[in-house]
Image: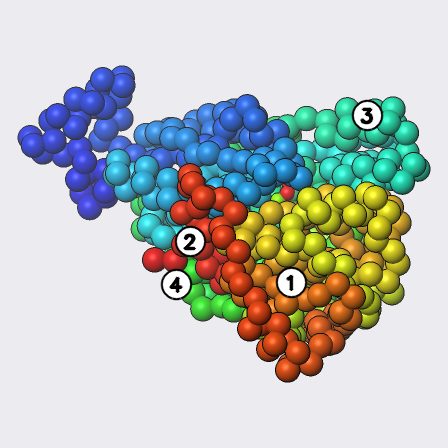
Amino acid sequence: MAGQEPSRTVLEGPERAPNRSLFYAMGYTEEELNRPLVGVVSAYSEIVPGHQHLDKLAQAVMDGVRLAGGTPILVPAIGVCDGITMGHAGMRYSLPSRELIADSVETMALAHGFDGLVLVPNCDKIVPGMAMGAVRINLPTVVLSGGPMLAGRVKDQDVSLSLLFEAVGKNKSGALSDEELEEMSQDACPGCGSCAGMYTANSMNCLMEALGLGLPGNGTIPAVSAARRRLAKTAGMRIMALIKEGVRARDIVSQEALFDALACDMALGCSSNSVLHLLAIANEADLAIDLKDFNAVSEKVPNLCHLAPAGPAHIEELDAAGGIQAVLRELVQTGLLHLDRPMASGKSLGEQIEGAVNKNPAIIRPFEDPYSKTGGLAILFGNIAPNGAVVKRSAVAQEMLVHTGPARVFDGEEEAIQAIYGGKIVPGDVVVIRYEGPTGGPGMREMLNPTSALAGMGLDSSVALITDGRFSGASRGASVGHASPEAAQGGPIALVEEGDRITLDIPAYRIHLEVSDEELETRRQAWQAPPLRVQNGWLSRYARLVSGADQGAVLKG
Ligand SMILES: CC(C)(O)[C@@H](O)C(=O)O
Ligand SMILES: [Mg+2]
């Protein structure tokens, strides 16, 4: 082996005999220690359905590393299940866990001298967290995600988590019995994998494929498929080639790659959380991108897919239609893609997508016949969110693209959900849920219960919602999140009063509080910052260190 690899610093020479002895203590042979050491970072656990099979995939990755002459070393990462944390205080840990994951990738890799990494994540924060850690330390890296769950079958219909969350709203309004709801909860999620729609986990796994850290198929091959295990072995083999060629994470995650991923995001109609995560990955890779870039790309890239929650199809159908490679192939016609950039596959983007075929134009609309000429996400600006707010416009009912209505103000998710379930929200209202931002929450909880309750109660085509918190990828409707600056930092969303009129104009990228500047100034003078909601533990540290959502909610130096 060459000699410059980090593992040589840990293992070579007489003075490293004690270090070697500890490897021998684990059963490694001399032969194994003479090979590159590949950290296989697995988020396997038995609390996340998206992760309960990652032990098998990590094993397949390790097999691939060995096949190609390396020594795989398995290390763990934590992971939070957003679905299980949804709707209670546990959700405060979800977004912050991304930072813990990034830090632990850095810690395990640099502390032990790994020469390269294969990241084995699957769910929402684990994918960006691991990617952030990898681009921060810039080792050769391949991502092998766990893959999507299959859709469930309920009453002859394909279902997944978004419909189940909405079914709760139906149940509250009396349209669905307790028994039917229970039956649905047993059948909606049929096994391992990341929840089956274009929710956050699958959005991020697809974007890993578009960035190039993930191999073709990474975003869409079902978790239970043998093809996913073969992909895992290939990922193990590919990392050995990247180590040999000296191709590092930042060679792949370049400015060009980031913008190509952004284009793919717009075509797919990814989760609004992808905004936070792409900003955070860019920050770690020292790449320049801001919220205005999202709109610039969104203006030029058509929305080609309406997967759940925007439509009835699930990721397995996107996979059968040709997956992300076919979507990227359609996007060549935008003229925006950087076809010469390198991918972890060893090919350039152009070579990689050359043979890709769109096998189902009902799932991947052809470039000439999109759902809309503009992309899935839009960033809105205005006096209520001067630093921006995010909406998944591809999942907004047509009649809600422009809307004005009275503010119904709630300081936190619990207050809002009680009012919605209690029938206190009526058509026309604009629900404001604040003090749920990165600092105020803390942790920017996902407002999936409120958005699903509105949808399930049939109010998604007449009620808008704005929050400084965020949404699930399963949220739909006129749901505007990440309003920045957040209420806890004195952002204008803190100054809204019950009955104020708010205008949402998505085509104009605008959100406006119909209150005069003078009146807002008077209210600002009277506003006082509330004490931090969480006073001890890691979350209180997080609340003090986190940046705004417009910066990706990353921890400040
Ligand atoms: C539970 C979900 C569907 O994973 C959600 O948290 C998301 O962000 O998509
Ligand atoms: Mg989530």
Any mark on residue 544, and which? Answer: 2
For disc 4, the marked residue is: 286
Name the image quarter holding residue 405. Answer: bottom right
Q: Amino acid at mark 2?
A: Arg
For disc 1, the marked residue is: 390
Q: Nearer the viewer, residue 210 or 306?
A: 306
Crowding near the residue tagged with mark 1, few <14, some 14–19, many ≥20 C-alpha atoms within 10 Å: many
The quarter of the image holding the C terminus is: bottom left
Whether residue 464 is visible: yes
Q: Position of residue 363 (x, y in %)?
A: 78, 50
**Residue ranking furthest to the right:** 175
Side (left or right) of 423 relative to 436: right
Residue ID at (40%, 34%): 40
Say whether mark 3 is within 8 Å of ligand 1. Answer: no
Residue ID at (61%, 76%): 522
Q: Amino acid at mark 4?
A: Asp
Q: Are marks 4 and 1 in contact (CB under 8 Å)?
A: no
Q: Are marks 4 and 3 in contact (CB under 8 Å)?
A: no
The Cα–Cα distance between marks 4 and 3, rounded to whole angstroms, is 47 Å
